[in-house]
Image (cartoon, grey):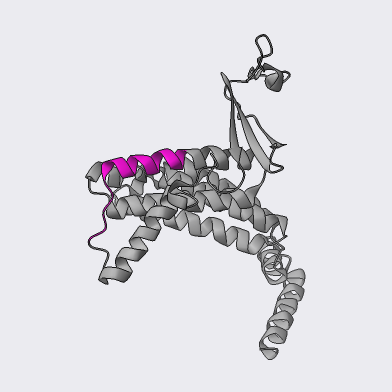
């Protein structure tokens, strides 16, 4: 029992000293916890949020699982095995709300990880939240629970692709990074088309972000020598530099013949 006057302070002011809250700015840092594990801290207006880097952000293990999502996915799998079908599996409004609350914790973490440029963690958490959308959309009892999260699918798809492309870019793999971004754009277009909103595709913020990223990635791709020569040939013809055009045509034919003979 603590002696009178010796109560330990729970005041977090010393922790926040020198770390002011800035409206409109996501301010995050990584610290080492008393358990020796890394933690994420996000500055908010009245203090801070602290999250685990791995597992569920609040460190809880509902029903002995990493997350509620994992728990319900396990129940779904067990239902399939026991009955040979998933028709009897449903999510109640309360269960869907719990999944949404949990997904928000993961959202706060992947945004924090994105700011810290820890993109592998962003890929993990955005892919995980997309699974929340999938399970609610398919198995929720109420229509509202099936649809309420779908509005976030383009954003989640975009964030997942941005993070995955960043991982690939760091490895110098610009080709696959660009493919990842284009695949995400196609997914968003299919999603919008499914709900009769194909006309909104070009105006969607997530698509604008991905288009800008695609342009940046294309600029980093190595130039195809054949494409470069063909471009120079067209310029030479337009300028009526026929001697130069003939040389360029010969070089194009040489490269094409060499490529065909090596196949």
For the point 56% across and 18% down, the residue is 46
The answer to whether residue 129 of the structure is visible from this angle is: yes
Give coordinates of residue 120: x percent, y percent.
63, 52
Most prominent secondary structure in the magenta stretch?
helix
**Relative to residue 105, is residue 87 drawn left or right?**
left
- Quarter of the image where one finds residue 44: top right
Q: Is residue 152 above or below residue 17?
A: below
The x and y percentages for residue 238 are 65, 61
- Which stretch did the figure color magenta? 88-104
Q: Is residue 41 magenta?
A: no
At x 60%, y 48%, the residue is 54
The residue drawn where x is 39% and y is 57% is 73
Residue 109 drawn above or below residue 1: below
Of 65 and 179, which appears nearest the observer?
65
Q: In the displayed structure, does residue 34 sit left or right of residue 63?
A: right
* In front of the other: 23 or 190: 23
Residue 12, x across and y down, in percent: 65, 20
């Amino acid at each position: 029992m603590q002696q009178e006057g010796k109560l330990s302070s729970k005041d977090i002011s010393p922790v926040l000293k020198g770390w002011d809250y800035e409206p409109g700015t996501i301010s995050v840092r990584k610290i080492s916890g008393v358990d020796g594990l890394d933690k994420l801290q996000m500055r908010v207006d009245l203090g801070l949020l602290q999250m685990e880097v791995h597992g569920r952000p609040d460190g809880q293990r509902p029903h002995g699982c990493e997350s509620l999502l994992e728990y319900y996915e396990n129940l779904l799998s067990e239902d399939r095995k026991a009955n040979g079908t998933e028709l009897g599996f449903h999510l109640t409004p309360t269960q869907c709300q719990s999944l949404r609350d949990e997904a928000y914790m993961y959202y706060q973490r992947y945004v924090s990880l994105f700011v810290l440029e820890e993109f592998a963690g962003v890929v993990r958490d955005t892919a995980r939240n997309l699974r929340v959308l999938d399970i609610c959309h398919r198995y929720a009892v109420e229509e509202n629970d099936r649809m309420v999260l779908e509005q976030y699918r383009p954003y989640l798809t975009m964030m997942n692709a941005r993070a995955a492309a960043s991982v690939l870019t760091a490895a110098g793999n610009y080709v696959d990074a660009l493919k990842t971004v284009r695949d995400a754009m196609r997914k968003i277009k299919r999603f919008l088309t499914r709900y009769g909103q194909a006309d909104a595709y070009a105006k969607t913020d997530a698509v604008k972000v991905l288009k800008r990223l695609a342009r940046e990635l294309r600029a980093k791709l190595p130039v195809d020598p054949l494409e470069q020569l063909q471009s120079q040939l067209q310029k030479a013809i337009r300028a009526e530099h026929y001697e130069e055009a003939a040389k360029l045509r010969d070089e194009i034919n040489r490269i094409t013949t060499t490529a065909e003979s090596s196949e």
